[in-house]
Amino acid sequence: MIRALALALPLAVALTATPPAHANVSEAVADHILPRVHSFAVQSRALSVNADADCTAEGVRPSFHNAFDAWMGISHLAFGPLEEEGRALAIAFWPDKRGMVAATVATLVAEEDDAVAEESAFAQVSVAGRGLFALERLLYDPAHAGYGRESYTCRLVQAIARDLSRMAGEIDRDWAAHGPLMLTAGEAGNTTYLAPKEAVQRLYTAMMAGLEFDADQRLGRPLGTFDRPRPERAEARRSARSLRNLVLSLEALRDLAVTLADGPVPATEAAFDQALAQAEDLQDPVFGSVAEPSGRLKVEIVQQSVRAIEAAVAAEIGVQLGVAAGFNSADGD
Amino acid sequence: MTTRRGFLVSLLASAALPRLSWADAGSPAYLAAAKEADGGHALFGLSRDGADLFRIPLPGRGHAATAHPSAPEAVAFARRPGTFALVIDCVTGQVAHRLESPAGTHFYGHGAFLAGGDLLCTTENHIETGAGRIGLWSRREGYARIGEIPSGGIGPHEILALPGDVLAVANGGIRTHPDHGREKLNLPTMRPNLAYVTPDGVEEVVTLSEELHRASIRHLASDGTLVGFAMQWQGDLPDPVPLLGLHRRGGAPVLYQADLAEQLAMEGYAGSVALAGDTVGITSPRGGRVHLFGMDGAFRGVARRADVCGLAPRGTGLMATDGMGGVLALDGAGVTPLALAARHWDNHLVPVG
């Protein structure tokens, strides 16, 4: 059994005097994070309720999309509550380089694993067999098409939806405690954020990692190489969400960037606007166009524009807030 | 090689000076380099509780330091691919010697003392051939270069002195050329290993299976019996990648992994490894976490801390440093912040003595 080591109290050494918590952090928590984690909890709850009422693919797909949309609004907040108990990966296991989602889902179905009967048992299933991508398999993959209301697959769909609802509820609940931790960064007794700057740094790092993920994974994986484009690697292509996920992620990151900024950030906003406009112009929901040169070029241009956002954010917001990429994580040796 | 006259002078000098110990430098338990708030760099001596005991300015960003086993001397290495190392007198704060890697070679950033501290060993790249070398330097002769031996592989990174004057060498397997900075020139064919080397030659070479040939073995720790090695995956990550192994001389290496979600969260990168009591830990600054395992391979838990990298034993637990200036104690009771300073702790936390 894994457990996160509890942080012990209190600081043994008096810390250097620090300025009060950054105003922008409280805005980011109140206006960006809390409404979004709540929305994900609501949509996941709706998904579970709807799946219980009608477990067929046709019945579940609309609320699957709503929950996935809400997840894209918070997936970049990959610290604190999203990190507990491996939640982020249990919700969205991607990239999946070894086809573990397909294999795990196939095994669950073939063995009619009893874990679906019990919420606590299902929480112990491999992260590759849970969450939005396992659900996507069941709802969209021809291998599972047409499952009936009495089938094991139906019960598995309901179990995955319940598990998502549980995790989303826990994230919402845990953020109610983590938010205050960010706001009291540097105060005595706060052993998560030892200085006010650490909360700002946390949000900034999450934002940059989100942009990197969009460029390297969401766009980079289907792009592959010029000689070998890999359209089959596009994220959530079965449910035709690849482009939608990119756009929703960029919109969420834009919101965080503007909230966190300490003044006007024209270059950052222009960079986001450009990347979003180019992405929407693709009109290619699964990045299938990467397979031929002219289409590939357009997707590459979007990727360059996302990287340009990273540069603009570093130059404007990073400088304003006095934060930069991690000292050691950027070094690598 | 030193002249007879030079040798005598150095003997006289050492006879005339009182023999200093680490107690004269405040008995630091650890050494760590850091970037300071003003952008400068310094080497710090830290107490067991993470308090500053001394601060010595450095001319640039270092990678790791090596502590002499008894004398208050630290060898600070430039970042890879640096060509100099500084022997620092930790009592006076002065640079006692400046070591230059021989022409056609550069340092990799780590070193170790053998022969009770008389012999400094440094990991080096012979640039032309890419062969890994261990440079040998005589402390008695004012840290004169006295020879070199093969490291048993390519890209030797951390090096560790084991009982019996044996060196454990993490041959990372990656060939680089200073003309190309840190660019990796041989990823498709890289083959890292853990080698045991003495001044007389390579005694044992441990390699992992072919499918793990991109797992660069980079950092080491030992309790005297077992050697822990930490790895960094090169290239596209398969799911998931082992990052920690333990090896006992003559045996087969055993790889340790956390559960799938935690293992993936390390992002294929371990920055430091440490053994203490019945615990072995690795840090991932990229994943922002420390993984703790029992010696039996059981995953004991995770401590999350952004940009955490330095890791060393502290009693039966561990101590970690991070890029935000934090010093943390990790033990069975959890994680206790010990100190926070306005500086960025660099890659490694080096135990003294």
Image: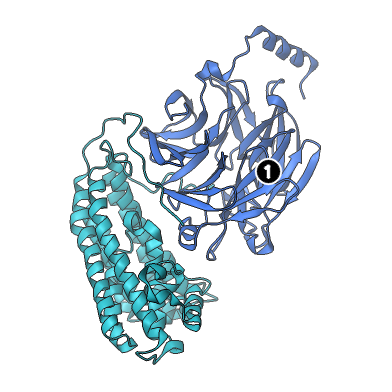
Chain colours: A cyan, B blue
| Residue A65, above or below B46 | below
* Residue A199 seen in this snapshot: yes
Query: Where does the image place residue A38, in percent across and percent down from the top left?
Result: 22, 64
Mark 1: amino acid: Val
| Nearer to us in this view, A50 or B10 | A50
Q: Is residue A159 left or right of residue B216?
A: left
Q: Is residue B90 left or right of residue B336?
A: right
Residue under numbered circle 1: B169
User: Is disc 1 placed on a helix, strand or loop?
Assistant: strand
Q: Quadrant of residue B203?
A: top right
User: Measuring 43% from the left and 35% from the top, which residue is drawn there?
Assistant: B35
Query: Where does the image place residue A167, in percent across and percent down from the top left?
Result: 32, 65
Query: Where does the image place residue A27, in percent across and percent down from the top left?
Result: 18, 52
| Nearer to us in this view, B342 or A324 | B342
| Residue A31, above or below B137 | below
User: Measuring 29% from the left and 81% from the top, which residue is drawn there?
Assistant: A51
- Disc 1 packing (10 Å; few <14; some 14–19; many ≥20): many
| Residue A83, above or below B290 | below
Query: Where does the image place residue A256, in percent across and percent down from the top left?
Result: 25, 58
